Amino acid sequence: MPGTTAADVGRRRDGRLRLRFDGWIAGIGTSSGTRVVLGYWVRSPFGPFSDVMLERKGGHRVLLAPSAQTARFVAGTYLFDEVRVVPVGVEVGRGEWTVAASPLDLRFVTGRRGPMGLLLRAVPGPLAARPAWAVMTAPAASALLGVRTHGSARAGRYEWYGAKDLRPVIEARAAYEGEDLGSLAPVEPAVRFGFGSTPRRPCVVGVTTTVALEGSRQAVPAR
């Protein structure tokens, strides 16, 4: 999964800035009730980075972000009860992912692509990255995966998710603050970070996420 540090910042005709993030989103449930959403961004306006959003069984929502800048941006887009700035390291190799983001340790394994993954891979990348494509595919994504591909976020922001790949997660183990979170389970109940959602079945999705900021005066992240 080659990466790049190039920023991707555009502007709509109405003057609103558009920020684009290319990478992967993993949604994983555990038998303890904790649900984990990993963002692994190989290209973004902040350079390559990873962040973790997790919701505990009791509903406590936590963001683990690698810098104050990324923490401010993600927390300005989604809802959290707690935000921690910690190193977030991700290693990927031959279908096995290892995530070290104190207080979270996570390892999971992906399986072979199913029909949905093969279908998404067949869509040309530039087309899948367009917000208009996310709007067009919204009904199918809702019916087949139970997810939304576009919608409003915090602070007047708007998001589009263009999926380009999908692999099932077939094995996972995680610990949070030293507590074993149990075995792999469906992502239920659905996470409550705001607009963002993941399929009920644990999976990793290749995606281009576009975020339109409210107003033209918001600062563009440093390149």
Image (spheres, rainbow, N blue to C red):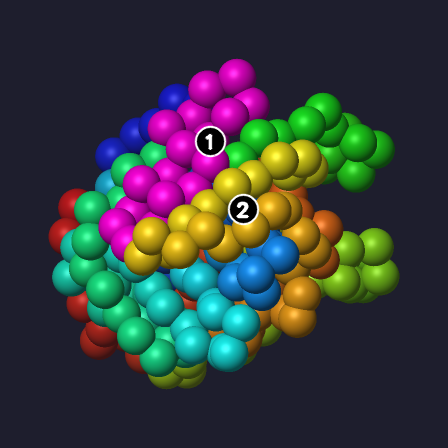
Position of 70 compared to 60: left or right? Answer: left
Residue 169 visible in the current orientation: yes
Whole-percent x, y for residue 146 in the image: 76, 62
Q: Secondary structure at mark 2?
A: strand
Q: What range is drawn magenta here? A: 91-107
Count of picture labels: 2
Residue 105 magenta-drawn?
Answer: yes
Q: Secondary structure at mark 1?
A: strand
Q: Main secondary structure of the magenta part?
A: strand
- Res 6 label: none
**Residue at 46 percent of width and 20 percent of height:** 93
Q: Closer to us: mark 2 or mark 1? A: 1
Residue type at tag 2 = Ala
Q: Which residue is mark 2?
A: 26
- Res 97 label: 1
Q: Quadrant of the N terminus?
A: top left
Residue 104 magenta-drawn?
Answer: yes
Whole-percent x, y for residue 116 in the image: 79, 38
Closest to the observer, 107 or 181: 181
**Residue at 52 percent of width and 47 percent of height:** 25
Earlier residue among tags 2 and 1:
2
Residue 70 visible in the current orientation: no
Against 193, residue 88 (above or below) is above
